[in-house]
Image (cartoon, grey):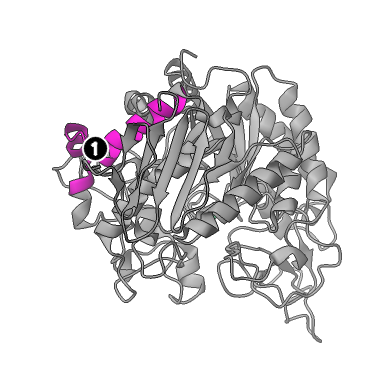
């Protein structure tokens, strides 16, 4: 490892870049991105100035939920390449100074996993069924689901097995997500040892860590008590806290992470775990990053915050405090493959609100305003102490595809809600690398698993690379300065609060973000980076941000 991400406890201030392999770069022209495609773009990733890559699942999978339904945890799906390609990716990344974080999905397998296939042909009560959550149905003939739990993707969280050859009553299995994603039984020691072995398999191949999918969901309350709310992952700020949900955030999950912590610690080189845990309040979230558990947990309160300076201040203060309480860092994030991209969210009338996808029938975001705010908000994200995760394409200012035709929809949530929820496809569109060609440089064939919206051309990497004021140039500048001033390891000090302004110093840098519609005066100091032009009057325009050097002020 040469430069980025090479220091001890690198994850404390790392900038992690989420690669969504299906949509990053397609080397073989089948319309779906792949591992050689990622390897080809390693120089681009290094030049961006990030420290690590989080690679969304590319393990063997029938792709019922875009790879979050894994049928063999030790194989790479042929769509993406081979285990050798993954090893090559790790090597290349390391040679470019980047760490690699794999995406581990322990809450459920695919229904095509050997274990589930075995369970389906095994007796109720058999060891094969004990790896999952099979239950008898309710009602005289057992044709009602065992309880009232609903799937995160809509509909009931249970599916009944098909007619049995032996004519015995058919059982039901639990799936908090799609029916092709049966939940595992984490009370079963065999499940635990299998996953430890899977973690070892990838650690032995050199991964630097794992992002743990649905980290708060592995343990379900014994007896599976009824729960009337939908088992949502959203946790919007106006929702009631989901802490009473029997499928989420049960205390028992922490034993699992304690044992994984030990396992990772037995390997050299500061390997890490980052939790995808939609947990409230922050004091509960902090339990995932106690010293003997995981290293990071994504801060979704930050992601879900509306465009409101006072709210940002509150969430930042509360998050830093809650994580500090357990000696952990905060992991800031604004976008990922499950949420409408923030360049689009911030262009909505209720700026920052998190819709379940946007299509032509919905309010269309104001693209220019959304982009303007997206360029500004990153000054705050990268100016904060701790780690930050970027989602591929946000460095270009990409919006969602907000008019994607229903015929292209692939997200199971779209089908399970009968189209009431449009789903997450809009934020998963293939990357525009070039301004021309049928797939904007995503591949050479022009095949695309999801079509790109017209305006993606203007955001292409080749276009932005030529423009010193592009969003790409801005990200590169910010990432350089962040490193230079060690902002990830710094300490935040709030400036006196001003209406609509988020303003703090972190070491020698003053961060000022204007969330309001009127210009505000800037404090003295040399401007290091600005999201928009600052005039002679030294006023920070509306929806803009700067980093100012206060060392020379
Ligand atoms: C969270 C992942 O980020 C999402 O994409 C997936 O659908 C669910 N977990 C189920 O694995």
The total number of labels drawn is: 1
Residue 400 image point, x, y percent? 33, 57
Q: Is residue 398 left or right of residue 333?
A: left
- Does 451 lie within the magenta span? no
Q: Residue at x 47, y 60 (%)?
A: 308
Front residue of 403 and 285: 285
Residue 147 occupies quadrant? bottom right
| Residue 77 visible here | no
Front residue of 492 and 269: 492
Residue 179 image point, x, y percent? 60, 64
User: Which residue was labeled with disc 1?
Assistant: 461
| Residue 85, above or below 429 | above
User: Going by the picture, which residue comes out furthest to the bottom?
Assistant: 140
| Residue 392, above or below 516 | above
| Residue 270, above or below 27 | above
Q: Residue at x 64, y 43 (%)?
A: 320
Front residue of 122 and 294: 294
Q: Is residue 545 left or right of residue 299?
A: left
Q: Main secondary structure of the magenta part?
A: helix
Label 1 beta carbon less than 8 Å to ligand 1: no
User: Going by the picture, which residue comes out furthest to the left?
Assistant: 436
Q: Residue at x 42, y 44 (%)?
A: 512
Residue 159 image point, x, y percent? 65, 70
- Does 481 lie within the magenta span? yes
Front residue of 97 and 67: 97
Residue 207 image point, x, y percent? 58, 26
Q: Is residue 33 left or right of residue 328?
A: left
Magenta residues, start to end: 458-483
Q: Residues within 10 Å of mark 1 (few under 14, many from 20)?
A: many
Residue 230 occupies quadrant? bottom right
């Amino acid at each position: 490892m040469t430069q980025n991400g090479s220091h001890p406890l690198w994850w404390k201030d790392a900038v992690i870049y989420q690669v969504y392999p299906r949509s990053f770069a397609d080397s073989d022209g089948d319309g779906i991105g792949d591992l050689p495609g990622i390897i080809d773009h390693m120089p681009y990733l290094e030049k961006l100035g990030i420290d690590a890559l989080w690679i969304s699942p590319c393990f063997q999978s029938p792709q019922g939920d875009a790879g979050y339904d894994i049928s063999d945890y030790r194989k790479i799906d042929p769509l993406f390449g081979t285990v050798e390609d993954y090893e090559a990716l790790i090597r290349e990344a390391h040679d470019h100074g980047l760490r690699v974080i794999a995406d581990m999905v322990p809450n459920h397998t695919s229904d095509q996993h050997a274990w589930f296939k075995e369970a389906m042909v095994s007796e109720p009560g058999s060891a094969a069924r004990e790896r999952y959550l099979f239950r008898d149905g309710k009602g005289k003939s057992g044709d009602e689901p065992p309880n009232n739990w609903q799937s995160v993707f809509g509909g009931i969280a249970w599916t009944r097995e098909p007619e049995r050859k032996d004519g015995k009553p058919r059982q039901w299995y639990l799936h908090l997500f799609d029916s092709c994603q049966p939940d595992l039984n984490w009370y079963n020691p065999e499940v635990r040892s299998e996953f430890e072995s899977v973690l070892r398999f990838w650690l032995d191949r050199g991964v630097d860590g794992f992002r743990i999918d649905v980290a708060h969901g592995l343990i379900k309350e014994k007896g599976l008590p009824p729960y009337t709310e939908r088992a949502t992952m959203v946790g919007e700020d106006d929702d009631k806290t989901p802490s009473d949900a029997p499928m989420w955030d049960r205390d028992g999950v922490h034993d699992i992470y304690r044992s994984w912590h030990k396992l990772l610690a037995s390997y050299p080189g500061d390997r890490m775990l980052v939790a995808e845990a939609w947990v409230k309040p922050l004091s509960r979230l902090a339990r995932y990053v106690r010293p003997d558990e995981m290293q990071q947990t994504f801060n979704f309160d930050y992601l879900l915050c509306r465009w409101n300076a006072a709210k940002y201040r509150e969430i930042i203060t509360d998050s830093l405090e809650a994580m500090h309480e357990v000696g952990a860092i905060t992991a800031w994030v604004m976008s990922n493959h499950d949420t409408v991209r923030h360049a689009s969210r911030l262009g909505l009338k209720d700026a920052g609100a998190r819709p379940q996808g946007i299509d032509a029938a919905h309010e269309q975001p104001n693209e220019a305003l959304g982009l303007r705010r997206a360029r500004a908000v990153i000054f705050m994200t990268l100016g904060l102490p701790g780690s930050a995760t970027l989602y591929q394409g946000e460095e270009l200012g990409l919006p969602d595809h907000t008019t994607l035709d229903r015929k292209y929809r692939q997200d199971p949530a779209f089908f399970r809600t009968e189209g009431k929820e449009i789903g997450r496809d809009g934020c998963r569109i293939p990357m525009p690398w070039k301004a021309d060609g049928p797939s904007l440089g995503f591949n050479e064939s022009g095949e695309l698993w999801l079509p790109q919206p017209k305006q993606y051309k203007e955001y292409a990497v080749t276009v932005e690379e030529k423009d010193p004021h592009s969003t790409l140039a801005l990200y590169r500048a910010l990432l350089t300065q962040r490193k230079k001033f060690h902002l990830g390891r710094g300490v935040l000090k709030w400036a006196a609060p001003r209406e609509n302004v988020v303003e703090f110093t972190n070491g020698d840098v003053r961060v000022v973000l204007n969330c309001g519609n009127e210009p505000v005066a800037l404090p003295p100091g040399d401007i290091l980076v600005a999201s928009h032009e600052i005039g002679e009057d030294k006023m920070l325009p509306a929806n803009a941000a700067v980093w100012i050097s206060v060392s020379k002020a």
